[in-house]
Each structure stands twice: as C-alpha cells, then as structure tokens.
Amino acid sequence: MAFTVIVAVLMRISGPAHHDRIIYFDIGQGDSALIQIGDFDILIDGGPTDEVVYKLGKYMPFVDRTIELMILTHPHADHISGLVDVQERYEVDVYVYNPVCYRTDGYTEFVEAAAGKGIAVDKIEINEDATLYILYPISFTRVGNPDDEICHRRGKEGWLPAKKNINNDSVVVLLTYDGENYLFMGDAEKELESELLASGVLDDITRVNVLKAGHHCSNTSSTERFLDQVHPDMAVCSVGENNDYGHPGKKTVDLFARKGIPYAITWQTGDVVVEL
C-alpha cells in the first residue's frame, strides 16, 4: 500500500483570521512549533516534556481547546513526548505522521489516538492564502505501525524503523502563505536533503523566508547544496542549553554566517515569533 502520510479527516476550518503567525518554541533540547492561521492551529512536534502545554496556553485563547492539525515529524522522544501530553488536554482534529516502525510507549499512544483516520495527502489548503505541503515522504510503502506483526523482530530493540537513521524518515513540511515560504525540516539530515533535491520537489522553492533547520542545526544537516537551493532569509535552530549533542554544530552555524543567513538559537532568543 503506497501512500504519503497518515492524516485524519479535516473536521472544520472556522472563524475569521484574527492573527496569523508562527511561533518556534523555546522548548529545550527538542522541536516544537505552532502555526496559527486565524483560529486554525497547527502544532508541529511537541518537544521532550509537557512544557509545550504551557506554551500553547500562552499563545492560544483559554477557551480554545482544539488543535486543528497535529504533525509528528518522527517518533524520537524530543519530538513526540510533549504531543502525548497535548493529546490529553486538547481535542485534535487532524493527525499527520509517517508511520514508521518504532517501538516506544509514547509512539504507540500517539498512533492509537490517530488510528482509523488515515487518508493520503500531499497538501492541505487552509484558506485562500495559506497551503501546507507535505514534501516528504514523497512516496512511502507502508511497513506497518507499532502494532503490526510485520514490524516485529527478535531482540531488545523490538521494532525496525523504515530507515537505519530514523531522522531521515522525518516528515518535511512547507507552508506557503501569501507567496512566502516557511520550511520545516524535522530532524532531516544530509541524506534526506539529497533525496529531496534529487526528487525535484524543491525545484520551485528558490527562497524560503524562514527555515526550521534540520536536526537542531547539527553538523549532519543544512548542507551547502541544500541551502543554495532554498536560500533561506533566516534559520531557526531549536536547541536546548548545554545539550549533550553539541548542537548547534559549529560547521553549520559557520556556514550560515558565511552565506549571510541570520540564525536564531532558541535557548538564547526564547520563543521566535514570526508574524505572517
């Protein structure tokens, strides 16, 4: 069965556009961003803890208890853990995720919440000004979700991811808004960047206003060839202070500087708010 991503049926888009913005959360060593188009809220990843719940409370009206679209780029704990907490406190209309085989309690809980709602899409039209495109997976042959027998293997690891490096199974999302582009790379590394370039899905993207850079701006992401294609006006590095991984990578931020690309490191700047 070939498909792009798992998505729940869109229940509603309602209300006038009262504030359109993207908030790249300062969420510690993890990823989370909130896109708000009118009263349509899109949450991409949830960071490593329940802090995302407090972030949502800061930017969403108290009476608004619905996330219209929730996107999980991939099931590493620093992206999914907070989403599990959000699911307990908010109604989620739509789920988007790449159903790789990866066994954790949090991922199993996430998949169970989205079960039975899947359709294949490559874009979601939010309104006449805003469209969300799923650039990766370009095409995907399902190998199962965490409860499918086909994912089972012997040994402690339990489940086999679709790729050896699950960072390169990240859902890659492009938001176009009134002619401007905002690219979210999840934890994509140079191998996935090369795959996207070779596929042609980036051919028409010659400038992005903001790049949420892959894998916390590590040295394994944001290659020169990729940056030369998408020409970001600004990059956001979602990074926790004094993390154990050496993020952001010196090689990557030096490349940003050499190419004249301003970058924000979330633990230094706090939440990065971009008005649309």
Image: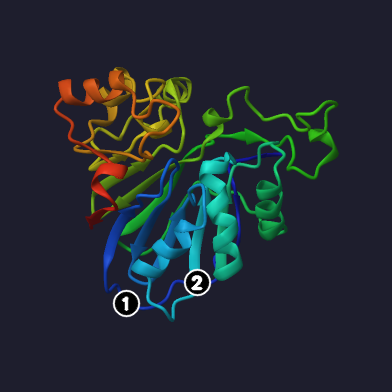
Q: What colouring style does the render use?
A: rainbow
Using the image, tell me which numbered label, if any, was put on residue 211: none
Horizontal and vertical percent position of residue 86: 54, 62
Q: Residue furthest left?
A: 260
| Closer to the camera in the image, 10 or 160 | 160
Q: Is residue 256 visible?
A: yes
In three-dimensional space, the C-alpha distance between marks 1 and 2, rounded to whole angstroms, equals 16 Å
Label 1 sits on a secondary structure element that is loop
Q: Earlier in the sequence, mark 1 or mark 2?
A: 1
- Image height check: is 262 above or below 46? above
Query: Label 2 crowding class (10 Å Cα cut-off): few <14, some 14-19, many 20+?
Result: some
| Residue at screen point 37% across, 54% down | 131
Q: Is residue 117 visible?
A: no
- Image height check: is 219 above or below 71? above
| Residue at screen point 36% across, 58% down | 35
Q: Residue furthest front?
A: 242
Amino acid type at mark 1: Pro
Quarter occupied by residue 30 = top left
Amino acid type at mark 2: Thr
Quarter occupied by residue 213 = top left
Q: Nearer the viewer, mark 1 or mark 2?
A: 2
Q: Looking at the image, how many numbered discs can be counted on the residues? A: 2
Using the image, tell me which numbered label, if any, was put on residue 66: 2
Horizontal and vertical percent position of residue 259: 17, 23
Q: Residue furthest bottom?
A: 63
| Residue at screen point 29% across, 21% down | 250
Query: In this figure, which residue is indicated by the disc labeled 1?
Result: 16
Query: Label 1 crowding class (10 Å Cα cut-off): few <14, some 14-19, many 20+?
Result: few
Tell me: 102 left or right of 23.
right
The N terminus - image quarter: top right
Tell me: 2 left or right of 128.
right
Horizontal and vertical percent position of residue 220: 41, 20
